[in-house]
Amino acid sequence: MSTPYYQDDLVTLYLGDCRKITEWTAADVLLTDPPYGIDYNTGAQRESLPTSIAGDKDTTVRDAALEMWGPTKPALVFGTWRVQRPLLTKSLLVWDTKGALGMGDLRIPWKPAHQEIYVLGDGPWKGVRSTDVLVCPPIQATAKNGRLHIHQKPVPLLAELAEATRGVIADPFCGSGSTAVAARMLGRKCITVETDEATAEIAAMRLTRETSSGLDFGGAA
């Protein structure tokens, strides 16, 4: 059994490789933003943010985590059309970022304004039936409360996704802890794993502040 890096009444965070730490697989639903497999390298000039993330050379880490999770348990997984979608994807949600996702390919007249979220597993899902387009502005790198992680997702979006699920939430790619923050806001238990210690420390500090004040101090990822 692994020793938690951070733990409170709702959130448990483990430090290490999610392929070796298995506690997260006992959760009821997977809500995660894994390495996409696009070898992303940001041009942002912020010394506090790394320019890339581990495991993003291909989809090996993502696919290994999904295999550990299993084919029938419910999962919501962020991704991109630029690589092969996870096997057994049952549906696709579109995150409309309201036009705020960078410049994209300058040779064409359209800039990127959406990301994909894959629906896997058998549920059960809950909530009022709605469309498969979710509108939410992203966390801007240069904003006053800018990104804590280069792939950071907004807490309101994660909370909206989590509200369509039941039970304990798993996020084996914790990043700066936004899924855990969203879970805590909803009074839900969450089991997370982060491989990078500096990033795990950011998540733990963020969760500590959020626990003591009841406020959300950042975006997501």
Image (tube, grey):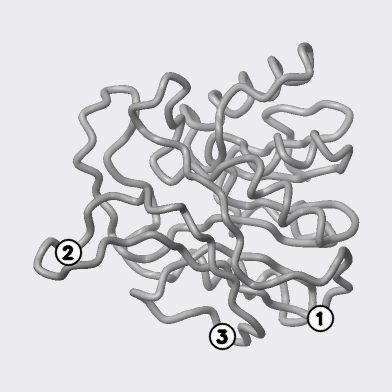
Crowding at label 2, few (<14), some or many (≥20) Cα neighbours within 10 Å?
A: few
- Could you tell me residue 137's position as x and y percent? 50, 45
Residue at 80% across, 35% down: 184
- Residue 191: image quadrant is top right
Q: Nearer the viewer, residue 199 or 146?
A: 146
Position of the C terminus, as image quadrant, is top right
**Mark 3, mark 2: which one is toward the viewer?**
2
Give the Cα separation between the discs numbered 2 and 1: 37 Å
Residue position for label 3: 87
- Could you tell me residue 112's position as x and y percent? 32, 61
- Could you tell me residue 6's position as x and y percent? 71, 27
Q: Amino acid at mark 3?
A: Leu
Q: Is residue 92 above or below residue 161?
A: below
- Could you tell me residue 19's position as x and y percent? 59, 59
Q: Name the side, left or right, on which 37 lies relative to 116.
A: left
Q: Nearer the viewer, residue 3 or 43?
A: 43
Q: Name the side, left or right, on which 153 lies relative to 146.
A: right
Residue position for label 2: 105
Residue 185's label in the rendered image is none
**Secondary structure type for disc 3:** loop
**Secondary structure type for disc 2:** loop
The answer to whether the residues at label 2 and label 1 have Cβ atoms under 8 Å apart is no
Residue at 62% across, 19% down: 205
Residue 122's label in the rendered image is 1
Q: Amino acid at mark 2?
A: Asp
